[in-house]
Amino acid sequence: MNGPPNGRTGTLRLWEGMQNGQPTAERRARQRAMLIAASPEDPDFAELTELLLTARVAVAGEMHQRRPTPDPDRYFGKGKLEELKIEIAACDANVVVCDDELLPRQERNLETALGTPVIDRTAVILDIFADHAGSAEGKLQVELAQLEYNLARMRGLWQHLERLGGATGGGVATRGPGETQIETDRRLARNRIAALRRRLEDTKGTRATMRSERERAALPTVALAGYTNAGKSTLLNALTGSDVGVRDRLFHTLDPATRSFEISGRAYLLTDTVGFIRKLPHQLVEAFGATLEEALGADLLVHVADASAEEDELRAMLDAVEGVLDDTGAGERPRLLALNKVDLLDPELRRALSFRFPRAVQVSAETGEGLQELREGIEARFLATLRPMELLVPYAEGGRLSELHDVAGDMKREDTADGVLVHARVPTSAVARFERFAVNGSPE
Ligand SMILES: Nc1nc2c(ncn2[C@@H]2O[C@H](COP(=O)(O)OP(=O)(O)OP(=O)(O)O)[C@@H](O)[C@H]2O)c(=O)[nH]1
Ligand SMILES: [Mg+2]
């Protein structure tokens, strides 16, 4: 992984980026993390551990403070901080990772009190995204998210790094403290943010062109949405016979991949999307907003979930995904729940699941089980969105008929003196194109 030794990845990337336009490929030294969380309930460090594993950071220990809300200045209380300091030394951790997004102030105060670099969950996720971004657009989106995140954290950082001295590892701290430097950096960061926004706007334009081409083809679109590692890419491959990258790691897919497949002779487009996660950094939702909006504007969303997760865990993952869908304005799209990885469940658990989620389809992208039901489910949901139309297509416009044939359902045709009279059920997305042939209610 490309990353600096002190774990303040995003920040260092930013400075490196501003120095020479490109982040330098610096090897991450072996990091041993102490995980911390403050919450009224028992902590669950499993996901953070998984995230760190993906970021190739080892977990050395964990500490939880039970309290209604984190301390606004130091995250933990004073006494607990002392305990943490001792524990860090005891398990030889060299970075502290907080399961919440820290306020810049909390992060700074923690670092000062502990003498150890402190990063938060958001920084870890941003780091993984930066590592996994493949396309030019994906890279721009991640850089934008990182800059937004870092901008809030720049004030006073120079003096702070000075104070930490050796712990931060030379490079940055020697660049010289002082308000001027901070101001320069902030201005450069803002300029870069503006430039990135403009470039992302441009790519959005390109995507709109691609989309309108697709709309002309008017194939129904289906998007796979879901928690990271739920098996979306595996399912895309299983349904379309493609070979999109699949791995047992978080946020493997960042760029939406679209492939076509057929159900009962009708072609559909299926899009794989970036995975979601609890406390998904809002900077990422914003940066990926346009791509997500595009993908999630599909005729049908298939929400893919990992059914092998524990009951509470599954509920939490489903809620997190629904939350992001609402945030991105996709909350109202027609939806189908696909409970994936049922090959890992015994018959009793499967039965329990079918009681809990009677409308969901149980599938295994791995074994192919349930895929036929999923196809039928997709088709049924899609057909339900079709609008019945009666059209009179003049013989001169014969080409339109074959277009209609490609997209419509239940098509019945009858030759008349004026043209072909057609009864068909037309996808909502294609209604506008055929409206002018409508027999009832049309001025023509
Ligand atoms: N047992 C089992 N494993 C599965 C199934 N589907 C996917 N997996 C595994 O789950 C892991 C994640 O699969 P992906 O398809 O990469 O998941 P994803 O939802 O695309 O993940 P991100 O792109 O990271 O959001 C891989 O190790 C897959 O082999 C399934 O039906 N059964
Ligand atoms: Mg994927």
Image (tube, rainbow, N blue to C red):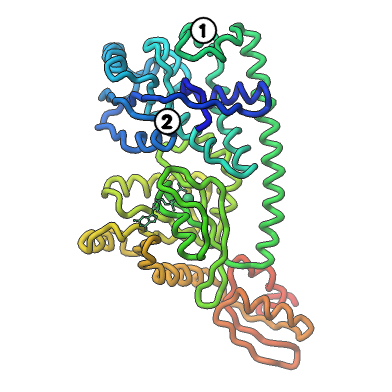
Q: Quarter of the image holding residue 155?
A: top right
Query: Which residue does the numbered mark 1 point to in the structure image?
Result: 162
Q: Where is residue 201 in the image (x, y as percent from the top left)?
A: 69, 42
Left or right, residue 419 beside residue 226:
right
Q: Position of residue 369 (x, y in %)?
A: 36, 67
Residue 384, above or below 233:
below
Q: Position of residue 263 (x, y in %)?
A: 50, 73
Identify which residue is drawn at 38% across, 10% down: 113
Looking at the image, can residue 191 be seen? yes
Residue 120, above or below 263:
above
The amino acid pointed to by label 2 is Arg
Identify which residue is drawn at 26% across, 58% down: 345
Looking at the image, can residue 77 be seen? no
Mark 1 vs mark 2, CA separation in Å: 24 Å
Q: How dense is the environment of label 2, judged by Cα within 10 Å: few (below 14), some, or many (20 and up)?
A: many
Q: Where is residue 131 in the image (x, y as percent from the top left)?
A: 52, 36
Q: Is the CB of the residue bearing disc 1 within 8 angstroms of ligand 1?
A: no
Query: Which residue does the numbered mark 2 point to in the structure image?
Result: 121
Identify which residue is drawn at 39% across, 66% down: 368
Left or right, residue 298 beside residue 246:
right
Q: Give residue 220's mark.
A: none
Left or right, residue 194 beside residue 142:
right
Q: Which of marks 1 and 2 is in front?
A: 1
What element does badge 1 sit on?
helix
Q: Earlier in the sequence, mark 1 or mark 2?
A: 2
